[in-house]
Amino acid sequence: MTISAITSATAAGTGASQKAGFGSLGQKDFLRLLTTQMQAQDPFEPVDNKEMLAQMAQFSSLAGISDVNETLKSIAKKLDAVLGAQAAAPAVATSTTSTTTTTTPAS
């Protein structure tokens, strides 16, 4: 079975995903492609189990990497907020110390 046969078979179903690019392909797209691949395969020469497992493992790895990427983006946003707060802290401290006056008791 060729890739072009699978691509042409799924072109109508993944039109929205193709417009957004391959970076937006998700689990739903993978399952649709896998289902189409299974339907289009030759029953006398089915896809090798090792090949199928390799495809599933690649997708699982990709999903895990996507989750890690989202987590790192969240951490980066929080660190930016902390750094912004730290940068603002000395400015607040100097403005409060300049407005306070010290008084000494009279002897």
Image (spheres, rainbow, N blue to C red):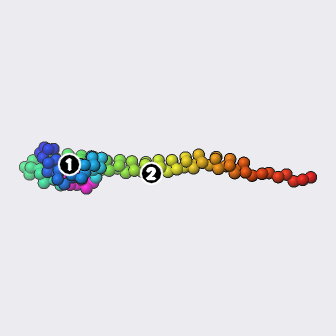
Please give the label number shown on residue 92. Answer: none
Q: Pointer 2: what residue?
A: 74
What residue is drawn where x is 43% and y is 48%?
72
Can residue 33 be found in the magenta stretch? yes
Q: CA distance from mark 1 to mark 2?
A: 34 Å
Q: Could you tell me the amino acid type at mark 1?
A: Met
- The answer to whether residue 37 is visible is no
Left or right of residue 72, residue 33 in this image: left
Amino acid type, mark 2: Ser
- Inspect the magenta stretch and tell me whether residue 57 lies in it: no
Q: Name the residue rendered at 75%, 52% in the picture.
A: 100
What span is in magenta?
27-34
Query: Are the residues tagged 1 and 2 within 8 Å (C-beta)?
Result: no
Depth order, front residue of 5/12: 12
Q: What is the x, y in percent for residue 92? A: 64, 50
x, y (%) of residue 71? 42, 51
Q: Where does label 1 land, which residue? A: 52
Q: Nearer the viewer, mark 1 or mark 2?
A: 2
Q: Residues within 10 Å of mark 2 (few under 14, many from 20)?
A: few
Give coordinates of residue 25: x percent, y percent: 27, 50
Disc 1: CA contacts within 10 A as few (<14), some (14-19) or many (>=20) = few
Q: Upstream in the sequence, badge 1 or badge 2? A: 1
Residue 45 appears left or right of 27: left
Number of marks in the rendered image: 2
